[in-house]
Amino acid sequence: MKSLIYLMPVAILLGSAGLGAFIWSLRSGQYEDMDGAAQRILLDDDCSQDAADNGSG
């Protein structure tokens, strides 16, 4: 039972740190463009780079 004296503040501290990190990520715009990364992976950067090197594009 004495260990609860130490474990409860540690759990509250870790929980509030996680909540603070989540709120920080919301405010910094981490979740603004959810489809951008999904679409970016489908783009073929090699073809667009070759077209730019050849002058067509």
Image: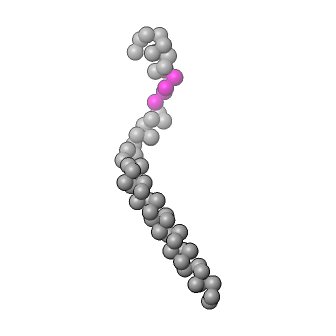
* 35, 29: nearer the viewer: 29
Which residue is located at x 39 percent, y 50 percent?
A: 28
Q: Residue furthest top?
A: 55
Residue 5 quadrant: bottom right
Front one among 34 and 6: 6
In the rendered image, residue 50, in percent from the top left (x then y), is placed at 50, 16
- Whether 45 is among the magenta residues is yes
* Magenta stretch encompasses residue 18: no
Q: Quadrant of the N terminus?
A: bottom right
- Residue under the point 43% across and 10% down: 55
Give above or below for 28 relative to 37.
Answer: below
Relative to 3, is 27 on the left or the right? Answer: left
Q: Is residue 28 above or below residue 41?
A: below
For residue 28, side relative to residue 14 (left or right): left
Residue 24 x %, y % = 42, 56
Q: Residue at x 54, y 74 (%)?
A: 11
On-image quarter of the C terminus: top left
What is the span of residues highlighted in magenta in the rendered image? Answer: 43-47
Q: Residue drawn 51% across and 71% down?
A: 13
Magenta region, mostly helix, strand or loop?
A: helix
Q: How is the image coloured?
A: one colour
Q: Nearer the viewer, residue 45 or 14?
A: 14
